[in-house]
Image: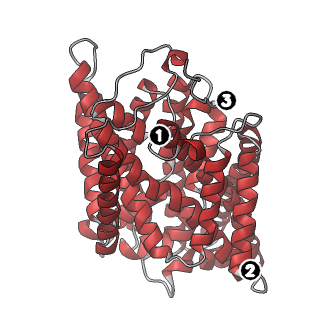
Amino acid sequence: MSSPSPSLKRSLSLTSVVAFGLSYMAPSLVMVIFGIIAAASSGTAPTAFLIATLAVLLTALSYARMAGEYPESGSAYSYARRLIGAPVGFLVGWSLLLDYLFLPMVAWLTQSIYLNAQYPDIPIWIWMLINAGLTTGVNILGVVLSDRVNKVMAGAAMLIVLLFAAFCVVHLLGSPPRSVGDAWWNSGSTVSGVFGAAAIAAYSFLGFDAVTTLSEETKDPRRTIPRAVVLIMAIGGALFIGVALLMQLVHPGGEFDDPQIAGYTLSIQVGGQEFADWTNMAAIVAGFGSGLAVQLSSSRLLFTMGRDGVLPRRVFGALNSRTKTPVYALLVTGAMCFVGLSFDLTLATSFINFGAFSAFTVVNLCVVVHYVRNRRRRRLNPVTHLALPAAGAVVTLWMLTQLGGTALASGLLWLAAGFLYLLWLTRGFRRPTPRMTLDDAAEGQAPEPARA
């Protein structure tokens, strides 16, 4: 008799899942990239964020529908296996490895660069080890502790952004009237420029989908995860648009001495040097929550693929008997900090974007396939289950084409390597692609066979 598949412990509420998603997205990111978006859109950053919100919302709705149908860890990887086929699911999971392996590394590296700027006597590599070590330790001790720490960090991040927004409002009340209309569209605006800026702004939302990897640790996941996905997008989108509008009113137009530090410059303008320094430090501390959430979801994808036998099962598919956490998967993601010490940040970000937008496209297609298969035996709305996800697939494919040549070339090479690994794993497709080993009976449904 075969031993039961390892399963994760259900302990997360709707509030917990939303907090993880918001931490993953990093609310203070709007302050960091505002200058880049404003410059690209000729001073209409809120319009770019609005378009990005609406575009990504289409994919968020698709994730919500799939999470309600299949509440299991693995996210896009699991949906593609069930609905399109095991080989496609494998390649989606392989593509997502770019996203989930490099995201923790980039989070720690960015954090370490800012800490080094604040405390230059301590080198970046020491900050990397500290950041990776702390988040790995907290996540190994269990999802309950991670949840508590993450709620505090998510609250701190939101407080920072809201405090900055309040200072912007006070500054505007004491300044000459500004044209709100020009912040949305002005004489220098172009459709191509604003949509190009929206493609950049869409990267700010990467992470709303990560909460679907927590399905097996969430209470009542069929209801909780879909609601959480939509709430995360709604809260994040409203926050990004609102703060971008205030910042654009404080600094009309899209010309900056250095767009990359425009947020820090505006902090000085609205609150003074001391306020800017404290805000910068608080953002660094709050960023710890983002690294925590990123590593947590990354380890869950590795655990699911290890449990399936796609990755070595003894390493990635094992859970600690006491903490019920995938310790080895967490240690592997933690070890990525060493890669970050010598890796190019721009290329790492390109990998992340390629993996994310590829997965987004496939999840939208999964909803379409689900509609086609089930439309005769279930009452499914063709608008919400066909038209909207099809539009979402078109939008995410377009976003994929907006990436640079290096990103596309690197991503396609990684995908080709995954296909070769799949050929070896299946001995030229003479063996089946490793199947899902989830305990579907626990969810009250019969397991679906993997499709070769």
> How far across and down, in percent of the image, does residue 227 sit?
51, 31
Res. 393 in view:
yes
Of residue 197 and residue 449, the one placed in the foreground of this image is: 449
Q: Which mark is residue 118?
A: 2
Quadrant the N terminus occupies: top right
Q: Which residue is mark 1?
A: 309
Say if 345 sits above or below 227 in the image: below
Of residue 427 and residue 389, the one placed in the foreground of this image is: 427
Q: Which mark is residue 70?
A: none
Which tag is nearer the camera, tag 1 or tag 2?
1
Q: Residues within 10 Å of mark 2 (few under 14, many from 20)?
A: some
Q: Which residue is mark 3?
A: 9
> How far across and down, in percent of the image, does residue 426 sit?
32, 43
Mark 2 is on which residue type? Answer: Gln
Quadrant the C terminus occupies: top left
Q: What kind of element bears circle 1?
A: loop
Q: Which residue is found at the position 37% from the left and 74% from the top?
A: 40
Spatial separation of the CA atoms under disc 1 and disc 2: 44 Å
Mark 1 is on which residue type? Answer: Gly
Q: Residues within 10 Å of mark 1 (few under 14, many from 20)?
A: some
> How far across and down, in percent of the image, does residue 13 sit?
66, 30
> How far across and down, in percent of the image, does residue 19 sit?
64, 43
Mark 1 or mark 2: which comes first in sequence? 2
